[in-house]
Amino acid sequence: MTPAFLSYAFRPFFLAGALHAAAAVGLWVPAYLGIATTPGALPPVAWHSHELLFGYVPAIVAGFLLTAVANWTGRPPVSGPLLGALVALWLLGRIAITASAGLGAPAVAAATLAFPLALLAVVGREVIAGRSWRNLKVLAGLATLAAAQGLFHAEIWLDGQTTYADHLAVAATITLVLIVAGRIVPNFTANWLRQHNPGPAPAAFGIFDRISVSTAVLALAAWTALPALPDAAAPIGGLLLAAGGLELARQWRWQPHRTLAEPLVTVLHVAYFFVPLGCLLAGAALLAGGPGTAATHAWTIGAVGLMTLAVMTRATRGHTGRPLTAPPATVAIYAGILVAVAARLVTAYVPASVTVALPLAAAGWVFAFAGFAVAYGPMLTGSRRDGA
């Protein structure tokens, strides 16, 4: 009989991902400030970006997609030995990075790439077997994220630093947010509004959404290619501003202002807001000057960090038979990420504040993910409350 922990992918991957996210930032900030070292051979900043973009993000993506694909295709969920093997491959990547000082670069790359390639194969098998063709775009996002990880190792191996890989990974992850959150945020909002605040429903996906998402994806691609296009900073900046404006308009059509009574729904909108905000900050930095790191952290901490926590808390509660509402401990988890992103943006615009604001950002992040592990770990490892 399959144990509860391996019955659905969200269980092991959400818990492992949260613990890893807390540990990665908890280790990196002291290293950045020069009072500790990060494990392995990667430079501290490269280690930080790799373990969040290619460690944390794929774990949560796997937990969500391998759970959701069963609903999308009508096929049984990925569980049992296959799920256990995927978790083991993810752990292998973390071990390889930690032990990279004693391993060759090819061995580290092979060990870390095993999981994203296996995940792509499993999700692809489910999508194709279930003839869920609309989700091929999700596969494209996964493939791009895996390619970014391969590029990361190639750049580190050849140049000792990354030029394109980190940006490509951020762009791929935000594209997945545009696609997946663009489905679930209006859907979850509509479900809640019907029961608790009847009125206009979130706008259905249509031509405006296609234009908005296409503009954002194009802008992200251009932002990724910027080092090769130094003379195109102005048009790329304008494209990013246009994408940000269109995404703000798209989100407003989802009725975010009418969800304030339920934090479990509101947080989805707050998280999505950081997608257009990142576009606007990136565009402003290119056109008027300013720190490019502000946009990067709006996307990674705000959009990715908060959106993944919002999905993790909601999915865990729903799939374990808990009410779809956010108790105070869950709201505190969300608040931790908001503290983290606010403090990290302060460090971008006020560099002198780094010794205070950066530890504050780390504390907010670690509190949020360690808090998730404490509050939701028993739900993830135990049986459903209703016995189903």
Image: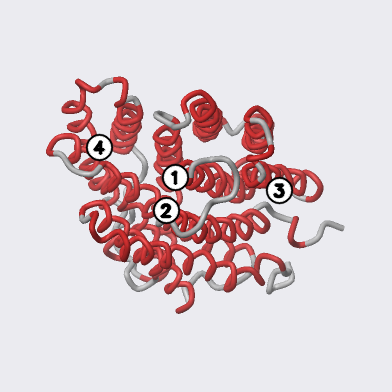
Mark 4–mark 1 CB contact (< 8 Å): no
201 relative to 157 in the view: left or right: left
Q: Residues within 10 Å of mark 4 (few under 14, many from 20)?
A: many
Q: Is residue 130 above or below residue 377?
A: above
Foreground: disc 3 or disc 1: 1
User: Of marks 3 and 1, which one's residue comes earlier in the chain?
Assistant: 1
Question: Would you name the residue on which mark 1 appears?
Answer: 45
Question: Would you name the residue on which mark 3 appears?
Answer: 87
Residue at (48% x, 47% y) in the render: 48
Element marked by disc 3:
helix
From the image, which quarter does the N terminus lie in? Answer: bottom right
CA distance separating discs 2 and 1: 7 Å
259 relative to 123 in the view: left or right: left
Question: Would you name the residue on which mark 4 appears?
Answer: 243
The residue type indicated by label 1 comes to Val
Q: Where is residue 145 in the image (x, y as percent from the top left)?
A: 51, 34
Q: In this view, does 307 lie above or below 47?
A: below
The residue type indicated by label 3 comes to Val
Question: Would you name the residue on which mark 2 appears?
Answer: 32
CA distance separating discs 4 and 3: 36 Å
